[in-house]
């Protein structure tokens, strides 16, 4: 789920949240 969002180059707030959670 998170990986898909990270792979998708989308400047959306959800993507940022996912990235933050993934890096956390």
Image (cartoon, helix red, strand yellow):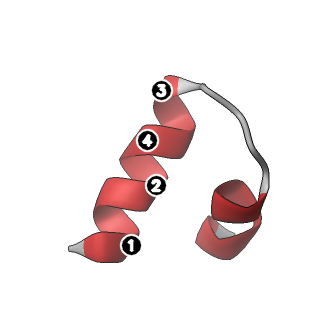
Task: Tell me the distance, in whole angstroms, between the alpha carbons under discs 4 and 2.
Answer: 5 Å
Task: Tell me the distance, in whole angstroms, between the alpha carbons under discs 1 and 4.
Answer: 10 Å
Q: Which residue occupies the extreme top position in the image?
A: 12
Q: What element carries label 4?
A: helix
| Pointer 3 local density, CA inside 10 Å: few below 14, some 14–19, many at least 20 | few
Rendered view: 12 above or below 4: above
Residue occupying image coordinates x 43% and y 58%: 19
Question: Which of the 4 image quadrants contains residue 15?
Answer: top right
Task: Tell me the distance, in whole angstroms, between the alpha carbons under discs 3 and 4.
Answer: 5 Å
Q: Label 3, on which residue?
A: 13
Contact (Cβ within 8 Å) of mark 3 with mark 4: yes
Rendered view: 12 above or below 22: above
Q: Label 1, on which residue?
A: 22
Nearest to N terminus: mark 3 or mark 2: 3
Residue 24: percent from left, percent from top? 20, 74
Contact (Cβ within 8 Å) of mark 1 with mark 4: no
Q: Is mark 1 on a helix, strand or loop?
A: helix
Residue occupying image coordinates x 66% and y 74%: 3
Contact (Cβ within 8 Å) of mark 3 with mark 2: no
Q: What element carries label 3?
A: helix
Residue occupying image coordinates x 61% and y 26%: 11
Q: Is mark 2 on a helix, strand or loop?
A: helix
| Pointer 1 local density, CA inside 10 Å: few below 14, some 14–19, many at least 20 | few
Question: Which of the 4 image quadrants contains residue 16?
Answer: top left
Contact (Cβ within 8 Å) of mark 4 with mark 2: yes
Task: Tell me the distance, in whole angstroms, between the alpha carbons under discs 3 and 2.
Answer: 9 Å
* Disc on res. 18: 2
Rendered view: 21 above or below 10: below
Nearest to N terminus: mark 1 or mark 3: 3
Nearest to N terminus: mark 1 or mark 4: 4
Q: Label 4, on which residue?
A: 16
Rendered view: 20 above or below 3: above
């Amino acid at each position: 789920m998170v990986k898909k969002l990270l792979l998708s180059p989308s400047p959306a707030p959800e993507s940022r949240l996912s990235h933050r959670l993934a890096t956390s």
